Image (tube, rainbow, N blue to C red):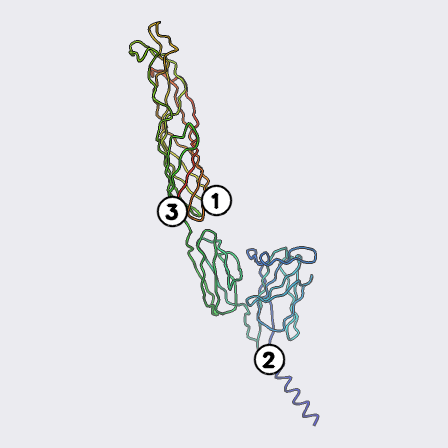
């Protein structure tokens, strides 16, 4: 009787333990992933207040126990991986399987705060090796740098490659100033690569601007361009009124004949009369809805220069004569910089400044020789309002 019971017990144990005895778990690869920010996104502090590192064990087995040389703060299964939060300085973890095999894994170097280490395993079953490394999936975006979410769980920044269990999944791709992309897909046992060309949120805009300060409050400008991560704009400014009125020769006795006067050869420095220019440049977001615009300006600046009219006759005092004007024209290049704010992706408010340095000649009335040259700095400050569509 007892012999029969012992025989049945041995047979049952054989069928229960036999498949296990044919299995062996080995470490396939240990990878330090510097671009993985899972430890930052899932921050946990150790007993000393330091940010922990994460070890991701990629294996699908039951009855697995983990330990490390510095202890384990937290263990959690995430998307087919077992995440171990460990203190910084951890060098080794140990895995105890359900058949009481112990595997020691050494990291390439002591783990630092926020670092991520991935451990891949090989399962040897009946002497046939089977990689317990789940199929990989890659996300590639143009432009790169987009955040990748799988099943609403953040995975990293594109271009990104990681592994997960074969199954259906949802994804979401987010990049600032680009429209988000979301969808569903299925991962089979084969590696998969998904490519996305993200659509920019760039918008066209039109704007009218006007000069803010005297003596330049004589110009009105128009701008048009593209607002976005990197856009273009064109701007022009046109005079609506000269900065100074016309100057004539006159006296308290009324207008006089030019033959009664001669002009001295001493001219004053040039004064701004009017200026016209165009700007071509680029736009770029700097913070929130604030946008900076920078461009090169080219235009024509008109100056006037005055000369003293002196009477031939002593009965008409010199002090009662107003100067005679001569116009000068100078082409120059300049620099334009603007700060704009985009209100609800519709209204564009901006402050623009366009500056020129014109090398103007101060000469005598006869134009015989150049007396000197003077670099005149012109700064045109404008405010503008526009609409994007």
Label 2 near label 1: C-beta < 8 Å? no
Q: Nearer the viewer, mark 3 or mark 2?
A: 3
For disc 1, the neighbor class at 10 Å (few under 14, some 14 to 19, many from 20) is some
Q: From the viewer's side, name the closer residue of 208 and 137.
A: 208
Which one is earlier in the sequence, the residue at label 1 or at label 2?
A: 2
Which one is earlier in the sequence, the residue at label 3 or at label 1?
A: 3
- The tag on residue 204 is 3
**Residue 103 coordinates in the image, percent (x, y):** 64, 68
Q: Residue furthest front?
A: 253
Residue 87 sits above or below residue 62 on the image: above
For disc 2, the neighbor class at 10 Å (few under 14, some 14 to 19, many from 20) is few
Query: CA gap, disc 3 to disc 2?
Result: 68 Å
Q: Residue furthest top?
A: 314
Q: Nearer the viewer, mark 1 or mark 2?
A: 1
Left or right: 121 in relation to 357: right
SS assignment at label 2: helix
Residue 265 sits above or below residue 239 on the image: above
Image quadrant holding the N terminus, namely: bottom right
Residue 163 sits above or below residue 339 on the image: below
Query: CA gap, disc 1 to disc 2?
Result: 65 Å
Left or right: 92 in relation to 138: right
Q: From the viewer's side, name the closer residue of 237 and 172.
A: 237
Label 2 near label 3: C-beta < 8 Å? no
**Residue 280 coordinates in the image, percent (x, y):** 38, 39
SS assignment at label 1: strand
**Residue 239 coordinates in the image, percent (x, y):** 35, 31
Res 99 quadrant in image? bottom right
The residue where tag 1 is placed is: 290
The residue where tag 2 is placed is: 19
Query: CA gap, disc 3 to disc 1?
Result: 16 Å
């Amino acid at each position: 009787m007892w012999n029969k019971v012992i025989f049945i017990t041995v047979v049952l144990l054989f069928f229960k333990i036999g498949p296990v005895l044919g299995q062996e778990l080995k470490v396939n690869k240990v990878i330090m992933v510097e671009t993985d920010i899972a430890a930052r996104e899932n921050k946990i502090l150790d007993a000393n207040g330091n940010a922990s590192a994460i070890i991701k064990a990629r294996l699908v087995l039951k009855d697995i126990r983990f330990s490390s040389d510095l202890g384990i703060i937290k263990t959690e299964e995430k998307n087919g991986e077992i995440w171990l939060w460990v203190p910084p300085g951890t060098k080794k973890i140990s895995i105890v399987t359900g058949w009481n095999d112990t595997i020691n894994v050494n990291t390439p170097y002591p783990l630092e705060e926020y670092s991520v280490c991935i451990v891949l395993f090989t399962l040897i079953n009946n002497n046939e090796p089977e990689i317990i490394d789940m199929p990989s999936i890659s996300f590639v975006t143009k432009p790169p740098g987009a955040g990748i979410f799988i099943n609403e769980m953040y995975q990293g920044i594109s271009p990104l490659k990681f592994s997960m269990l074969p199954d259906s999944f949802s994804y979401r791709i987010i990049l600032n100033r680009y429209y988000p992309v979301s969808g569903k897909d299925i991962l089979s046992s084969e590696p998969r690569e998904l490519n996305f060309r993200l659509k920019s949120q760039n918008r066209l805009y039109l704007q009218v601007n006007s000069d803010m300060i005297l003596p330049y409050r004589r110009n009105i400008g128009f701008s048009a361009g593209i607002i976005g991560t990197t856009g273009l704009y064109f701007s022009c400014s046109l005079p609506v009124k000269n900065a100074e009125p016309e100057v004539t020769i006159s006296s308290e006795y009324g207008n006089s004949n030019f033959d009664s006067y001669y002009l001295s050869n001493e001219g004053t420095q040039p004064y701004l009369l009017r200026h016209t220019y165009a700007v071509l440049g680029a736009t770029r977001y700097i913070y929130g809805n604030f946008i900076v615009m920078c461009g090169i300006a080219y235009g024509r600046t008109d100056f006037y220069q005055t000369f003293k009219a002196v009477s031939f006759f002593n009965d008409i005092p010199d002090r009662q004569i107003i100067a005679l004007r001569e116009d000068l024209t100078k082409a120059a290049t300049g620099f334009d910089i603007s700060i704009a704010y985009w209100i609800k992706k519709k209204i564009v408010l901006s402050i623009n400044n366009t500056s020129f340095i014109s090398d103007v000649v101060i000469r005598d009335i006869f134009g015989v020789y150049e007396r000197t040259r003077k670099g005149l700095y012109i700064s045109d400050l404008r405010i503008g309002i526009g609409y994007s569509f």
